[in-house]
Amino acid sequence: MNYKVDERGYYGQFGGAFIPEMLYPNVEELRSRYLDIISADDFKNEFHHLLKTYVGRPTPLYFASRLSEKYNAKIYLKREDLCHTGAHKVNNTVGQIILAKHLGKQKIIAETGAGQHGVATATVCALMGLECVVYMGKLDMERQRPNVERMRILGATVIPAESGNMTLKDATNEAMRHWINHPQDTHYIIGSVVGPHPYPDMVARFQSVISEEIKKQLSSEIGNPYPDYVVACVGGGSNAAGAFYHYVEDEHVSLIGVEAAGKGVDTGESAATTALGKPGVLHGSKTLLMQTDDGQVIEPYSISAGLDYPGIGPWHAHLFETGRCTFLNATDDEAMEAGVLLSRLEGIIPAIESAHAIAALGKMDLDDEDVVVVNLSGRGDKDLETYIRWGKY
Ligand SMILES: *Cc1c(COP(=O)(O)O)cnc(C)c1O
């Protein structure tokens, strides 16, 4: 079975580049050049140097002994929460900012929902001295005030999207419009393994440093690079893509994606795309998405802003369809309980996104010889308000 992207940008039936004609020159420039640029030695040297000295990589692979006892398995946590800015997202923005320089771009645009990707983008723009404009739904700006101010402190301009629901989808539309009008000098940094080809493949390659490190670290911990399971939460799918990347051909390693069930898969308030979705086109690629019978995108819901997305990346849709990856889900309450559990057992307060992956441990049929790697995508500092409002600790 081939799981990698083909030259047309497809993973099985999913992927491609469904874009307005006016975006074609921008996307085509990127498509025709990204592989040459990112596989050249000067790119790789700069990328790995920054990952080491700026992001703080390699992130530790930590044996969680009390969590292991609780779930009767050998559980390791890949500590992406220890990355600069508090999550894995910066691996991708560092890669794309170096790429933008190689493409000769002076300006960066991005869209953001909860603000995490906006902050990671504003961070690398400050690092490289490039102008940064972030589009964000007006409603999201009100809900995520601290991240808006973080971006501004970092020197970015945050522009409210005032159309539609004034959330992520509308911010994406505005960013696309900006890109169409500024094709020469601007690079658009997308924050997950979504969007038109080549974004899903490019972002997965930048995040694949996660599984590259896990392989080495697990070898020195247990004498072999292969766990029985790799578990990661899935919003758009970038942290999972990074954790799965170097294991996908090793079929004896089970890949587990965990989606947000919100208030419950059947309540109409969830973001469990594989459970509810059907094939369709979203943000430039064919993938699985939550939609009505006549193809309108259904508003997703999750307590976790990073998982509150109505689709998944096309690679994940393919991994789901082929059965290579098993998708589980966790409700808001299950995730919040798992977040408190990890805090109490290991002294690590996880991002609520990552807490969904921890919650899945209780739904797996584990035995004490099983080696499980959970990708801990981010830290919980940004979620303190949500923990406080939930209140059960
Ligand atoms: C954004 C985010 C996610 C979800 O995005 P993916 O692309 O699915 O990884 C998960 N965890 C954290 C901490 C995030 O900030």
Image (cartoon, helix red, strand yellow):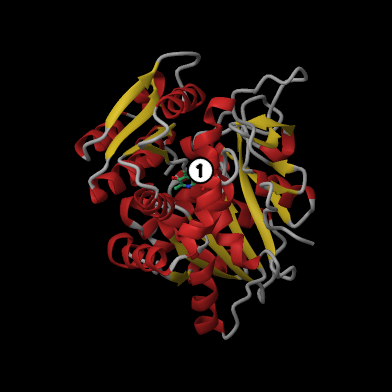
Q: Is residue 44 visible?
A: yes
Query: At x 33% / y 46%, what residue is drawn?
Result: 381
Nearest the eye: 154 or 262: 154
Asked if 86 appears above or below 19 in the picture, the reply is below
Where does the C terminus fall, quadrant-wise?
top left
Question: In this rendering, would 335 be left or right of 136?
Answer: right
Which residue matches tag 1? 29
Residue 169 at what x, y percent from top left? Answer: 52, 25
Query: At x 55% / y 54%, what residue is drawn?
Result: 204
Q: Amino acid at mark 1?
A: Glu
Question: In this rendering, would 260 be left or right of 383?
Answer: right
Asked if 120 appears above or below 138 in the picture, the reply is below
Residue 61 at what x, y percent from top left? Answer: 46, 70
Asked if 37 appears above or below 211 in the picture, the reply is above
Nearest the eye: 126 or 100: 100
Q: Residues within 10 Å of mark 1 (few under 14, many from 20)?
A: few
